[in-house]
Image (cartoon, rainbow, N blue to C red):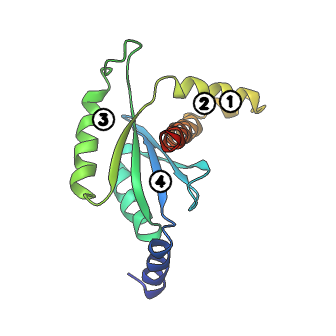
Amino acid sequence: MPLFLLILTFYLNLFNLDRIMAIDYGIKRTGIAVTDPMKMIAYGLQTVATHQIFDILKDYFLKESVSEIVVGYPRKLNNQPSESVKYINPFVKKLERMYPGKKIVLMDERFTSKIAFQSMIEAGLKKKQRQNKELVDQISAALILQGYLESRKINEQN
């Protein structure tokens, strides 16, 4: 690792300026969102082909300090896991094996795609822009992360 990255990582860890990442895992595409170093704002980072996710994470973790990874976990309306968990559970297990020092959190992702699409409409995006599924995945990851940040604030107040 280059010296400047080692120094940067040292200072980020010293001042606890690490980030939280959220992943909206899909069969074809995976949306990624991160917080700012102060852990106040969630924003979409990128959408990647799912088969590339571990390479992307490895590269990102070399550049940025991430303490927690929030993975969107699909549930049905009755709060039971949906059929999609058969794809997500192996991903989460591999994530835990590869990054044992990072806290992995499962977060309910119900309706995030619908909310993401609605937010695109409200933001005035044209129909062609709203058909960009990669943008929807990125926004969905940001919504999962924002929900997690809000739940942390509520838990800290109690």
In three-dimensional space, the C-alpha distance between marks 3 and 4, rounded to whole angstroms, equals 19 Å
Q: As rendered, which of 43 and 137 lies closer to the eye? A: 43
Which residue is pictured at 58% across the width and 60% down the height?
Answer: 38
Q: Earlier in the sequence, mark 1 or mark 4?
A: 4
In three-dimensional space, the C-alpha distance between marks 1 and 4, rounded to whole angstroms, equals 22 Å
Mark 2 residue type: Ala
In three-dimensional space, the C-alpha distance between marks 2 and 1, rounded to whole angstroms, equals 5 Å
Dot 3: element? helix
In three-dimensional space, the C-alpha distance between marks 1 and 3, rounded to whole angstroms, equals 25 Å
**Which residue matches tag 2?**
116
Do the residues bearing badges 2 and 1 touch, measured as CB atoms within 8 Å? yes
**Which residue matches tag 3?**
88
Tell me where residue 90 sits by quadrant. Answer: top left
**Placement of 88 over or under 36, stated as above or below:** above
Q: Residue furthest bottom?
A: 3
**Which residue matches tag 1?**
119
